Amino acid sequence: MADEKRLKTVSRRDFLTGAGILIAGGTLGLVGCGPKQEPAEAALEIPAWPWPYVKLDPEDVRKRAHKGYYEGA
């Protein structure tokens, strides 16, 4: 008899409503949790267009990309 009192049927509509509220609340809770970053325009000076062609050293690019990946850049 005690088991019958604990069981409650949940309609599909109630379940989906609750799931939607949970997902929306979780999403809104995550907004603004990342690290604060300055806008890219304030940190870098962008040269005038058209940008000049610069030949890249593939080995230097590979090393910088590898380092940047592990630093999270």
Image (spheres, rainbow, N blue to C red):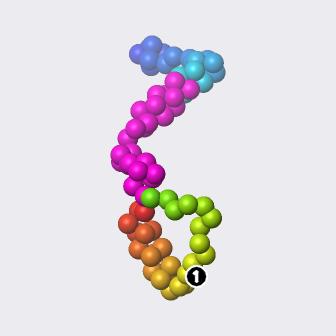
* Main SS class of the magenta portion in the image: helix
**Camera-nearest residue between 61 and 8:** 61
Q: Amino acid at mark 1?
A: Lys
| Residue drawn at the location 45% of the way across and 13% of the way down | 5
**Camera-nearest residue between 26 and 49:** 49
Q: Residues within 10 Å of mark 1 (few under 14, many from 20)?
A: few
Tell whether position 34 is magenta: yes
Q: Position of residue 14 (x, y in %)?
A: 58, 18
Quadrant where the image shows the C terminus: bottom left
Q: Which residue is mark 1?
A: 55
Hey, which quadrant is residue 56 in on the image? bottom right
**Camera-nearest residue between 56 and 45:** 45
| Residue drawn at the location 43% of the way across and 69% of the way down | 68
Q: Position of residue 45 (x, y in %)?
A: 44, 58
**Camera-nearest residue between 39 and 31:** 39
Looking at the rendering, the stretch of residues picked out in magenta corresponds to 20-44
| Residue drawn at the location 60% of the way across and 24% of the way down | 16
| Residue drawn at the location 63% of the way across and 18% of the way down | 13
Does residue 2 appear to the left or right of 48 in the view shown? left
Is residue 15 at all visible to an observer of this figure? no
Quadrant where the image shows the N terminus: top left
Local secondary structure at mark 1? loop
Q: Position of residue 8 (x, y in %)?
A: 51, 16
